[in-house]
Amino acid sequence: MTNYGIILEISRTHLLSRMKQTSIAALGVTFGVGMFITMISFMTGLNGLLDGLILNRTPHIHIYNEIEPSSIQPIERLADPADFQIIRSVKPKKGEVRIHNALPILSQLKRDARVKGVTPQVNANVFYLAGSIELNGIVTGINVMDEVELFNFGDYIVDGNPQDLAKNDRGILLGAGIAKKMSLKVGDRIQVSSINGGIVPLKIVGFFQSGLAEVDKVQSYVNLRTAQQLVGGGSNYISDLNVKLWDMELAPSMSKEISAQHDLTAIDINTANAQFDTGSFVRNLITYVVAITLLTVAGFGIYNILNMLIYEKMNDIAILKATGFSGRDVQQIFISQAMLIGLVGGVLGLLLGLALSVMIDGIPFDTPALPTISTYPINYDSTYYLIGIVFALVSTFLAGYLPSKRAERIDPVDIIRGQ
Amino acid sequence: MSLILEAKHINKHFREPVDFHVIKDVHLSVKRGEFVSIMGKSGCGKSTLLYILSTMDTDYTGELRLDDELLTGQTANRLAEVRNEKIGFVFQFHYLLPEFSVLQNVMLPARKLGRKSLEEIEHDAMEKLRLLGIDDQAHKKAYRISGGQKQRVAIARALINDPHIIMGDEPTGNLDSKNSDIVFNIFRELSHEKNLSLLVVTHDHDFAAKTDRLIEMEDGRIISG
């Protein structure tokens, strides 16, 4: 039979009568939780940004026709495998870069239930002509509205908008690096020469900036039809298929399936970008380690203060025990004091963390590498706030446990006799 | 008259720093409504005996009964319940919780017992304070009242759960003669009017002489009474 009302009232009175010590103990927790929230919000915000920078526009499966030497040379088919053969200087067979039967594959993939969407692309190597200078580069033909929908393409258009390209078959979204080199602006015309020698004049409808300078110096985008004309192919000429799945985890198995079925190269996102997961993981790990360290330090503070409090409160403990409070009741009084400190400090810490996050969120962060970002990224995921308060309660419970255990064991006779 | 408290063959040793036989085969009983005092020189074991009788000290051999319930060998939790419900304590040093008000101090054991609503407990506590003539101090913090008043608050606290017996360890030891008399008269009244048993350890001859029965101790034994 425990009366929690009276136990909480006693601990509250103890805490309030020592406002200074209580606030210092709570401030330790506030600081620890606040820093944890701030750091984790900032770190995961940054992770999200960096992942988004690459992962959002990376297809989950990229299908293309790799140029490589045949793995089985004709002679190997003819000769007895036991015979000794040497073939020197093996070269790839002449063939086309385009995907054979691209349109049937495209419609097959679109029907697949696992697939969110597929976008066809045509890559063409070109020269951008500026006066007497020829800059080499890559023009990619795309269905621009599909790309916007599936791969956030719109985020990387810094001037103009995707509709301008969709409407204009003679339009080009020029890489920002190229535009800077050639001092071009939106509305200007640029001559693009294809490898076959044909020269096509295109109107600049906007600039494209990926955030990776090396890419922006060579890459431009045109409509699929325009690119097909540049390479001299028909409407079935498609060099790449980019697949986005509903569930990214299926990418490795599905890419194997596709490459086996169609004799094409299919690269899944995990293979292509394994380092991103590692980076995010390490950043989160560091955040948790720092938070646990801060809260451990706060925990030692609470441990100290409770020990002192129990020493001061020997008489109270003795009288409580003499008048019928059990050791367990006394232990609960001190545990609840630690937890109250943890609760109040933790809630204040969440508010501090939120306030700091909002502040960081407002700091301008202008970088040419990240065209869509104007302030530091912050992740306001409520899960971290939950983790923060649980951290605070668990660490204060542990800090309060040992001192309260001591209070439980205090023998009232020793205290009363000792006076 | 039936017995409220009965102790048989109580023996206790202090083992630190050397073995010392402090209580030697003590028999003691208190009847309902009896006002008993224990006297003896310092170190004769009278306080130690009181702590054993009050169930706070469990390190003894023998047999202790309160209200016909055998208390020897009970769990610490059960003993705490018994103290809460059936025994009221008054100590030489007043032992109030200093940060709480007088009223809260008196209410504490009743709130632990948890049999009555908060309003009833508060009403009872005010009754007890009125009985002891200190109801005007009820809302002061316990550390702000005088020594004599503190002792009366402690008595009010001892009475709050309507205990079967009140035990006092030199309850007047720290008071001047005027306050001493007040406390004695309160005990006297409780014993006569409410048929409450009292067992008080004291140094004060005048106080002891006025009680129903005087037990004298020496060297861990009861020599008279």
Image (cartoon, rainbow, N blue to C red):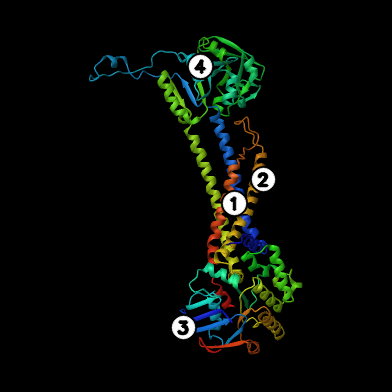
As drawn, the label of residue B20 is: 3
Q: Nearer the viewer's eye, disc 2 or disc 3?
A: 3
Q: Amino acid at mark 1?
A: Gly
Residue pointed to by mark 2: A355
The relative height of residue A249 versus residue B64 in the rendered view (above or below) is above
Q: How many angstroms separate mark 4 from mark 1 (CA)?
A: 55 Å
Callout 3 environment at 10 Å: few (<14), some (14 to 19), or many (20+)? Answer: few
Q: Earlier in the sequence, mark 4 or mark 1?
A: 1
In terms of depth relative to the viewer, which is nearer, A65 or A37?
A37
Q: CA distance from mark 4 to mark 2?
A: 50 Å
- Residue labelled with disc 4: A107
Give how far across and how far down residue B165 sits, in percent. Answer: 61, 77
Rounded to the nearest angstrom, the CA distance separating label 2 from label 3 is: 65 Å
Element type at marker 4?
Answer: helix
Amino acid type, mark 4? Ser
Provide the residue designation for mark 1: A32
Name the N-terminal-most of marks 4 and 2: 4
Tell me the mark number nearer the camera, choosing from 4 and 1. Answer: 4
Label 1, residues with CA under 10 Å away: few <14, some 14-19, many ≥20: many
Q: Which amino acid, by three-letter code, is at mark 3?
A: Phe
